[in-house]
Image (cartoon, helix red, strand yellow):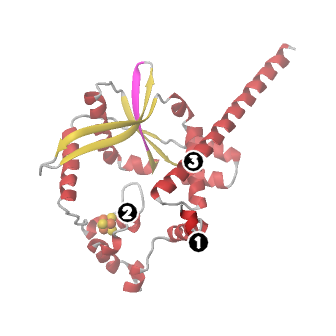
Amino acid sequence: MKDELNLLKKDKAKLKELQYLVEVEEWIAQEYEANYERLRLEGGHALTPEIKRQGLLQIIMYFRKMREVAETVTETEVKLTLPEQLSPRGNKFTIEGVVDIIREKDTTTMYDVKTHDADYVKANQEDYLDQLNVYTHIWQNLRNEKLNGTAIIATQFPRSLKKAIDADDEEKLQRELEKWDPVIPIAFSQDKVETTINKFACVVDKIESREFKPPSIDILLERIKGTRQRFATRVCRNCDARFSCDAYREYSQKSSAYSGGFAEYISDLGNTDEVENFTNTNAFETPPPTNIDDLI
Ligand code: SF4
């Protein structure tokens, strides 16, 4: 009888846990939808149903994997501001960032959530380190708070996990979730903060002086660490300025991908997925109102 009671208790606890998970995931979906609608109305940009679904999946998988962090986070979306900075050419600027903070007993950890993949973050740690060091500087010196660690959370899940989701294979999904490690601790240091702030300052000066010279073609041809893609493919093909960019034009003229000449170059609207997404988004969008009263 005692054993049966224990079993019943365990089943009840399991049921409660499942109910909790269902409720949280439903809440995430509702908030995601509301947030998306708000951003769509504010920014005028829409997502295709597939991209939207993938965005929601990324958040749900993040919750399943990082539940402990998500539940213990003490401050979310903490805005860090470094105001009144002066560039070498006398331009005033402010650095701002948003992070999540977890305080546990005697330790405080700062997390910066990125929609990048973990392999890319690991291979390009120095890019993230600079940014985290500035946030750490603001946290420790301007807010006078202590910090024990910093980390990036890379929410883009690996291809193998995506395959398990698409295959709707619960066992495989669990295995892949266990293998996935989206938290990349990054040891912060305050040695290079001034140099990093100075780098930001030089960029501000260039923007204010309208200096927008693109990098050389050598940079466009370089493979980006942690990926098999060149700069031109990963960055330039997503850049709205590419058709008026000398470096990209030069790259295109040398690239075998544009053997069709100028016509092919100018009609390249991105990779097939992007073009399909763009077409679908517009196809799924509500048609413009035909009655003036609908606009009022
Ligand atoms: S295409 Fe855009 S991202 Fe690429 S080099 Fe030119 S300006 Fe930079």
Q: Which residue is mark 2?
A: 235
Label 1: which residue? 290
Distance (Cα) linking label 3 and label 2: 30 Å
Q: Please report the residue visible at 71 percent of the width from the left and 33 percent of the height from the top.
A: 19
Residues rendered magenta in the picture: 106-113
The label number, if any, that marks residue 266 in the structure image: none
Q: Amino acid at mark 1?
A: Thr
Residue 108 is inside the magenta segment:
yes
Q: Amino acid at mark 3?
A: Ala
Disc nearer the start of the sequence (1/2) = 2
Q: Is residue 187 visible?
A: yes
> Disc 3 designates what residue?
34
Which circle, 3 or 2, is nearer the viewer?
A: 3
Crowd class of label 3 (few under 14; some 14 to 19; many from 20; radius 10 Å): few
Say above or below: 145 vs 30: above
Q: Quadrant of ligand 1?
A: bottom left
Contact, mark 1 vs mark 2 (Cβ under 8 Å): no
- Answer left or right for 9 relative to 253: right
Residue 224: horizontal and vertical position, in percent? 36, 59
Q: CA distance from mark 1 to mark 2?
A: 39 Å
* Image-quadrant location for residue 129: top left
The residue shown at (70%, 52%) is: 168
